[in-house]
Amino acid sequence: MKISQKGLYALQAMMALARKYEQGAIKIRDIASEEDLPEKFLELILLELKNARIVDSVRGAKGGYQLRRPPSQVRLSRRRPIAKPSGAG
């Protein structure tokens, strides 16, 4: 199965959030910078992951995104938004 660029960016973002899970919410700007991802595209991806209930958003000065569950409990096989084959809708 070929994974789309969007899917690869989503995986990178989730890995970044997993590495920093104990630190709490991480700003989009920081994820984009550390993973060398386009910030605007990352915003759309994280919103989609939030709607899929994979990540949560936190508002405020210390806000950002964080995984909804501990990294050890996240299963990629259950999540279609990030594993959708390219060209499939």
Image: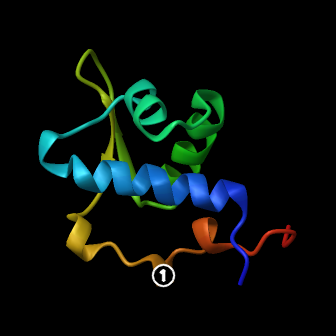
Which amino acid type is marked by label 1? Arg
In the rendered view, tell whether residue 72 sits above or below residue 33.
below
Q: Residue at x 46, y 41 (%)?
A: 35
The N terminus is located in which quarter?
bottom right
Disc 1, SS:
helix
User: Residue 71, located in which quarter of the rendered image?
Assistant: bottom left
Instruction: Where is residue 21? Give x, y as percent.
Output: 20, 50
Q: Residue at x 48, y 33 (%)?
A: 32
Instruction: Where is residue 78? Give x, y as percent.
Output: 48, 81
Q: Residue furthest left?
A: 22
Instruction: Where is residue 88? Give x, y as percent.
Output: 84, 73
Judge by depth and name the residue closer to the eye, 66 or 85.
85
The C terminus is located in which quarter?
bottom right
Residue to which mark 1 is pinned: 78
Q: Residue at x 87, y 69 (%)?
A: 87
Q: Residue at x 60, y 59 (%)?
A: 8
Colouring: rainbow
User: Residue 6, located in which quarter of the rendered image?
Assistant: bottom right
